[in-house]
Amino acid sequence: MFDESNYPYEDRWKRKRFWNHRNTLIGAAMAVILITGIKFAPQWLSSNPAAATPTTAYIEYGSRRIPAVIPQEVEFLAPALQMVNQSGEPVSLDDYLGQVLLLNMWATWCPGCVAEMPELEAYYQAHQAEGLLVIGLNAEDSAADIEAFNQKMGLSLPHWLDVNNSLYSAFNNNHLPSSYVVDRAGVVRLAWYGPISIEVLEEFVSPLVDE
């Protein structure tokens, strides 16, 4: 029978060291396999791995690509706004009960507002026959400035002017651009701060238009 005591201490240490080194290599290999399995297990288990990573929508603004924001679900009654249209006539949200309203707070000097305006116009054109009305709410510019902006951008969506300085307090928000979607019953259902793309509008607002 093998008697380890017959070997010098140094030889026994070398044999023991070799055994531990081999075990270390085996353990390291098993750890790599385990970590790899954990990392890729969701992809192996998923029937459609590509669907797990949504594509980010962008807005083209000159040479820049601006990521579109995602709306937040909210629920509160639309505030009573005291504003005038571009002809100077008083307007109210109550006059449009039964329609879905996309209210966009903006200004001509706001880069994000300018970037998203073609997206809002395209969405308005695509869905106005279904009862959607996109309204620009402006507390910063004159009627003449807004009209010049509309002509330059080729816009047809209506704009309301805040002649009573009540817009920002009505929504308790002065961030530009900001948008709110009011359903047919007069309840604000979606809100977001920042520019949005037509792809995101289709995904989040169109279901409310279809209700």
Image (cartoon, rainbow, N blue to C red):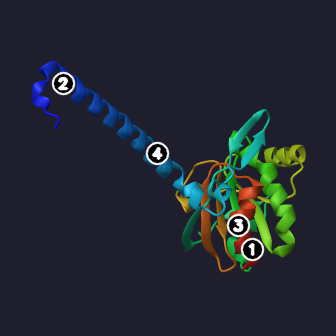
Label 3 CA crowd tier, 10 Å (few <14, some 14–19, many 20+): many
Query: Which mark identifies residue 33?
Result: 4
Report the residue marked by disc 2.
Answer: 13
Q: How crowded is mark 1: few (under 14 residues within 10 Å), some or many (20 or more)?
A: some
First along the sequence among labels 1 and 2: 2
Callout 3: helix, strand or loop? loop
Marks 1 and 2, how far apart at CA = 79 Å
Residue at the (85%, 49%) spot, across then down: 150
Q: Across the whole image, how many numbered discs are drawn on residues?
A: 4
Question: Which element is circle 1 on?
Answer: helix
In-front residue for pair 141/193? 193
Residue drawn at x 68%, y 49% is 56
User: Mark 4: few, some, or many residues within 10 Å (few <14, many ≥20)?
Assistant: few
At label 2, the amino acid type is Trp
Circle 1 is placed at which residue position? 209
User: Based on the displayed image, in which of its 4 quarters is residue 9 positioned?
Assistant: top left
Q: Distance between the residues labelled 3 and 2?
A: 73 Å
Query: Which residue carries the number 3 mark?
Result: 205
Q: Is residue 139 above or below residue 190?
A: above
Q: Residue at the spot x=75%, y=48% of the render?
A: 116
- Image quadrant where one finds the C terminus: bottom right
For the question of whether residue 92 can be seen, the reply is yes
Q: Neighbour class for label 2 at 10 Å: few (<14), some, many (≥20)?
A: few
